[in-house]
Structure formats: C-alpha cells, structure tokens
Amino acid sequence: MNAYEKITNQIIEALDQGIIPWKQPWIIKSQMPQSIRGKAYRGINAFWLGFVAWRKGYKDNRWLTFKAATSKGGRVRKGEKSQAVTLWMETYNHETPCSETNRKKKCNKLGKRGKCKKFLFLRYYSVFNVEQCDGLDIEPIEDKPVHDFSPIEKAQQVVDNYLERESIELKTGSAAYYTPSQDTITVPSTETFKSSASYYTTLFHECGHSTGHETRLNRKDSKEAIHFGDTNYAKEELAAEMTSAFLSADTGVHDDVEDSQVVGYIQSWLKALHNDKKLVVIAASQAQRAADYIRGTK
C-alpha cells in the first residue's frame, strides 16, 4: 500500500462512520498538531492528526515516531494504534553528462531544459500521540486558553485584507460562487445565513476558489470546465472546503454542518476518494497553499 492509499483509507474510514474529518473543531479545542520537535504539521497531516486528537480526547498536540519515543527515554504502550502521516521527498534525475550520480543530490544543471530534473514523491510514516506513550523525558505542554479572541472579528479581518490586497470585488447575490472571468466573489446577504459562522465558512470557501486564478496560484482545476461528480470537480471543491476549514480554525470560527448537508458531502467525497486515491492528499496540499496565500503568509 502506497502513501496515498494509506492516508485515503483513513479518511474513507472516518467518512464511513458519518464524520467529515476536516469539518471537526480540531484546532479550536486544541492546538495545531506538531511533531515532538515543535514543527507544526501541514496539509492533510494537520487535518488528520487534529481530528484523531479531538476524537480520542488527547490534550497534548505533540506526535512522534516509535523510534523517537525510545530516544526520549520512553516507550509506546502495548496495543496503541499509530497514525499515518505523509512526507514529500525529493529525488533528482541526473542526465549525462553530469558530475552528480547520487539521485538525492542537486546539481548546477537542475531545472534547465534537457538537463537534470527534480521530482517529488510521497512517503508515509507512523506516529503516536505523546499520550500514547509512557516515560517520555519531555516538558509538559503549556495549556493555552482558547477563548481569548474575537472569532468573527478575526475572520472579517482576514477577508478584508485578502480582498483588498488582491482587488477582488465582493458582491451580494442569491447564491455563493466565484466568477473567474470577472475575478469576483458573490455570496448571499449576511441576514440570510443561520449564523455568522455559516457566513464566514461560506465566504472562506469562495475565497479558496479565487486563489486558483491565473494571477495567484494558477490552479488548473479551478479554470477548466468541470462538472458535478467528476474528479476535477471533487478536487477543486475539496480544496475549497479544506481552505475554509484551515481559515475557520485559524480565526476560531466553527460552523455546525446540518445533517442533510453531511449526508450529501459524505456521499460525494466517498465516491470521489474511491475513484482517485491521490485526491484528498493533493487537495489538502492545495488548500494549505490557498490558506497561506489568503492569510498573506505564502
């Protein structure tokens, strides 16, 4: 089983149980998942480990490998289940003549037409939460409060900064959508939403679509003619959904999805994920880039 299949099967397992992992309050009630070295997980890893921590009730947001647990003087408890996380690795195709024979090394010909090229490939490895281990020689995590902010104010600030910086016009209409040809975002008026949180998650979703514009991240799936139910549609919609989830978690906005919506989403994602095992990993990577772009941290 390759890395895409391992991660996708985890997501499918959650969807089969009626749960959308990226819709859970995985950062609002805890901190961003991070490695034992303090580096925050990104993309699909952030979604999945945050979801698992929320589901299992872990209060510690740190994760580590079996080997790392041993190096910290501890051990993973018998019977504990690991979680798969992805890692993008680099390799190089060195064409002759080239002084570099090691496929892991760069060279001065890298990137030139007809010369050596860099490739990325995906691997996965297994990690455990700190709370699944005993005897670790590590400092206890600092318990940070999660109620010292104004969620809606933060959300509005993110939107205002992004729209102004990118000169995107926000219009009011009967539905929510992004128009690439005009580079405009349309959403219904605020009073038509059941909650302020619903308004911002919807607006974040459309902002996610807008990052695919050729002047921004130039995302292929956001520009081609796509139809409901096909893989390209699912990938672009999933990227926008995950972008909204990243931004919502970052600004403290949480929107409870209605049961009717949950059923529709789950059926759509399950079909798409069964058809394309790479979809969820790539969409999460695109969403991370989109969220970073919208926040201005690209």
Image (spheres, rainbow, N blue to C red):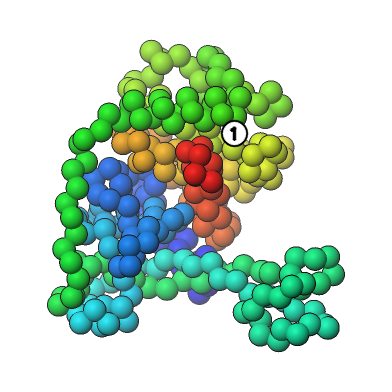
Q: Nearer the viewer, residue 187 or 248?
A: 248
Neighbour class for label 1 at 10 Å: few (<14), some, many (≥20)?
Answer: many
**Quarter of image, res 199:** top left
The residue at the point 46 percent across, 66 percent down is 86
Task: Please provide percent x and percent y for residue 139.
Answer: 18, 66
Q: Nearer the viewer, residue 157 or 81?
A: 157
- Answer with left or right where residue 292 lies relative to residue 250: right
Task: Please provide percent x and percent y for residue 179.
Answer: 64, 26
Q: Nearer the viewer, residue 166 or 52?
A: 166
The vertical placement of 34 against 219, above or below, is: below
The vertical placement of 33 against 227, above or below, is: below
Outermost residue on the front side: it is: 108
**Quarter of image, res 236:** top right
Task: Please provide percent x and percent y for residue 150.
Answer: 27, 29
Q: Which residue is mark 1?
A: 210
The residue at the point 42 percent across, 66 percent down is 85
- Answer with left or right where residue 205 lies relative to residue 69: right
Q: Work out whether residue 259 can be spotted.
A: no
Amino acid at circle 1 = Ser
Q: Nearer the viewer, residue 48 or 134?
A: 134
